[in-house]
Image (cartoon, rainbow, N blue to C red):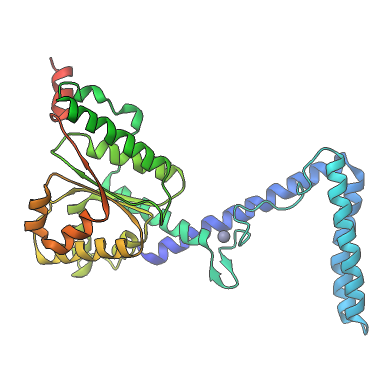
Amino acid sequence: MLREQIYAEAAAGLQERRRSAQMEQERRSDRIEQEIPEIAELNRHFRATCSEILRAARGADAQERIRQIGQRSLEADVMMRQLLTAHGLPADYLDVHYTCSACSDTGFVNGVPCECLRKEIGRIGAEHLNEQSGLKLSSFDSFSLSYYRDLPAEQKQAMAKNLRTCQNYAADFQPGKSGNLLMIGGTGLGKTHLSLSIAREVLEKGYSVVYDAAGSLLHILEQEQFGRAEQKDTMGLLLECDLLILDDFGTEQDNSFYRSAIYTLFNSRVNSGKAMIVNTNLDHSEIQSRYGDRILSRLLFTSEILHFYGKDIRMQKYRETHG
Ligand SMILES: [Zn+2]
């Protein structure tokens, strides 16, 4: 998906928010005018004020007259708020309630893109990337510690602690504040399940999350780099999203383009304080021999490390259901 398309989709979404906030205000206003005649009277006064100002602007003593009209209008506004509260309604009941008060859902503040527009672009971009990866969200509720019951006590405790760490990570997630998680362990031990449970909660909070296998993302980057895909900006999305989850790190093929893309990703995200979750079945020394010290240190020194233990859960589930 092109950057411009994502932008157009985000802008259209904001415009829709703005329109529906204004329509909602009109509905409230119509209803209340019928119930409270004094409010209908004040609203007529406000409408008259607008044309009065236009007329005054053409007069000789324009400045003084506009000041007086403004003063009366302020007084009418105070009366309106008093009337509303006297009828048991909030004082701002007849204001337009925009989703973003900073830009009134226009997407711009003094010509500069508002934070809400930036967020919407990130969210839509992430959504399109996740569509490609076939992201299926999991939840913490369906993560069962019973699959780890036969493990030695120490490993069982480690698994329970991993679950708690991930739950807390999701609950406390804040862009710019949350750190990185590095999940290490064999296939089928719950790394993906816990990552996708975090992804669900973070997405529900309205942050942008990109999740995919490292190999697929690197493949997309490679296609774009060498002009084999329509012009896209996947690297931009990977660097900007609030949370990046790289699954199966280390199963991708090993080449210099992939290694340098990984370094760019890790380095830029660490430097800009953006959170990552990296899942791998490589241990420290395997990461080091494959990617070198630069990538290893970027990863190890900035991450909380969670070790996963046990027997492949998918195999255990298969045996349970197939005898
Ligand atoms: Zn805004």
- Residue 46 at x, y percent in the picture: 86, 59
* Residue at 33% in and 34% down: 164
Q: Position of residue 73 (x, y in %)?
A: 87, 62
Which one is nearer the viewer's eye here, 150 or 315? 150
Tell me the residue at 46%/45% (across/down).
205
Asked if one can make out residue 275 in the rendered structure from this viewpoint, the answer is: yes
- Coordinates of residue 275 in the picture (x, y in percent): 34, 54
Quarter of the image for residue 222 reads bottom left
Quarter of the image where ligand 1 sits: bottom right
How many numbered discs?
0
Place residue 33 in its image quadrant. Answer: top right
Furthest residue toward bottom: 60
Left or right relative to 142: residue 224: left
State left or right for residue 86 relative to residue 297: right
Query: Residue, x 29% and y 37% (percent of image)?
Result: 194
Residue furthest to the front in view is 154
Classify 288 as above or below 206.
below
* Direction from residue 206 to residue 38 in the image, left or right: right
Q: In this view, does 60 lie above or below 317?
A: below
Where on the picture, by quarter, is residue 192? top left
For the N terminus, give its image quadrant: bottom left
Q: Is residue 137 visible?
A: no
Q: What percent of the width, then of the height, locates residue 316?
A: 15, 24
Report the front residue among 205 and 285: 285
Farthest-out residue, top? 323
Quadrant occupied by the C terminus: top left
